[in-house]
Image (tube, rainbow, N blue to C red):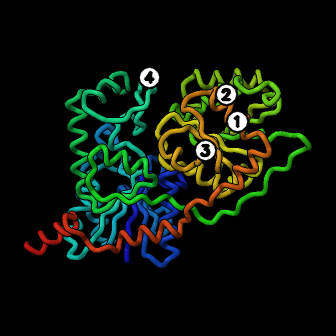
Amino acid sequence: MRVLLIAHGHPSLVKGGGEIAAYQLFRELRERGIDAYLLAATREDALQHGGTPFSMLRPHEILFHGQMRDFFNLAPASLRVVWHDFRQLLAQLQPDAIHFHHVLHLGTQFIREAARYRTKAGKPVKLVFTLHEYLPICANDGQMVMFDSEELCTEASPTRCAYCLKQRPPRPRTPEEIFLRDRLIRAAFSLIDHFIAPSRFLCETYQRWGLNRPISVIDNGLPPMQPLQPRPLHEGQPRASFAYLGQINRYKGLQVLLDAIDFLEPGLREQVQVHIHGCGLRDQHESLQERIETLQQRYPRQLHVHGSYNRDELTRLFDEIDTLVLPSIWWENSPLVLQEAKGLGRPVICSDIGGMKEKISDGVDGLRFSRGSPASLARAMERAADPETWERLRAGIQPPDSIQATAEQVLALYRAPPVNGSPGLAALATDRAE
């Protein structure tokens, strides 16, 4: 079997969770003897690609240099790269399954071209799509959070979305534009045989949106991880070393964690250690940067900002902390760092929404707090700092799904025969009729 996985970035260049999930599945398929290829979009202009939209990063790892400009409609800068270059790539590879992990930096037209290839292939070809967040539903970066108020959003409609986006750069969007965007994406999604959602919450959100294709809940499994021993403590010392790891943006809730320091009980506040590991801080609003600088001056022994990190540093970083904090204010799906914390045996404190709420059982393997509330987060941090409570939470941690288990389930989708109503079956029937 030959499989083409398509992602919106390569983890060698962009270290996002979706990119890493696609790459880990690609590597596992290769380990199993599957003839797998990875096509990953890149925005790196400096990379040489010989005048073509493709270049080879490593054997079986292809970069796509498309330079998407219409992010609102998820459309490529040039349709030629789809109906000529991508079409040629498919003809050359002749995949039996095409597995999309995103169309950002690619375009929904890539789905249409994959469906065209399926029609002409003369053999069963599966189109699979892993949903990582809500960009097809929400034009506000796929966050489903109101742009101006940061209020959680539960539904999309042309009027409601136009109201949300009226202040969002580069310009306001009309209800008519949003309606057409929605229809464009739905039409492309109707060509997919099977969708994958890494959390039940994400699955149900797309079902409410009206996605009527089959959806399987399959988490993004991880390679084997060895749980770490607890961090050594002095007599009477609390487990008060907390960390934030991941990208930094307005929806990740770092401000909530920073503000929670002021709400801690004074005795614990003197001993707490808050470590910030992440990239993107300098791209954020000045108010967040100023807030961090102010708190670093007020709490020079408590707050530590370390910058970005490499994945090979994960074990060392988690070895130095007690608890991971995920204060996101958007409907996180299945955060990779949450799964990594489980694999390394560290409890998690997270917001009580979205896939985070689904992945962490409050009081069992971690703690949940009220989304956006520094006071609620501070109470959770105080609970986790108690050594007995922390030991109980650590004992309740179950290992995350393995990449091996994920690959087994995904391969079953690739190999499953078309069912009635499947686009693949209809395409084959049309091809035979011709």
Q: Which residue is mark 2?
A: 260
Q: Name which residue lies at 37% across and 48% down.
A: 204
**Residue 293 vertical placement versus 1 (above, below):** above
Q: Quadrant of the N terminus?
A: bottom left
Q: Are marks 1 and 4 in contact (CB under 8 Å)?
A: no
Q: Which of the pair 55/384 is nearer the observer?
A: 384
Amino acid under label 3?
Asp
Amino acid under label 2?
Ala
Tell us which disc is closer to us: 1 or 2: 1
Q: Are marks 1 and 2 in contact (CB under 8 Å)?
A: yes
Could you tell me how far apart the alpha carbons at marks 1 and 2 are, in whole angstroms? Answer: 9 Å
**Residue 224 vertical placement versus 81 (above, below):** below
Could you tell me how far apart the alpha carbons at marks 2 and 4 are, in whole angstroms? Answer: 20 Å
User: Which residue is situated farthest in the right direction here?
Assistant: 235
Q: Quadrant of the C terminus?
A: bottom left
Q: Which residue is mark 4?
A: 149
Q: Kindly state the secondary structure of the residue where label 2 is placed.
A: helix
Q: Earlier in the sequence, mark 2 or mark 3?
A: 2
Could you tell me how far apart the alpha carbons at marks 3 and 1 are, in whole angstroms? Answer: 13 Å
Q: Which residue is mark 3?
A: 362
Residue 232 percent across, percent down from the top left: 85, 50
Amino acid under label 1?
Met
Q: Earlier in the sequence, mark 4 or mark 3?
A: 4
Q: Are marks 3 and 1 in contact (CB under 8 Å)?
A: no
Q: Which residue is mark 1?
A: 381
Q: Residues within 10 Å of mark 2 (few under 14, many from 20)?
A: many
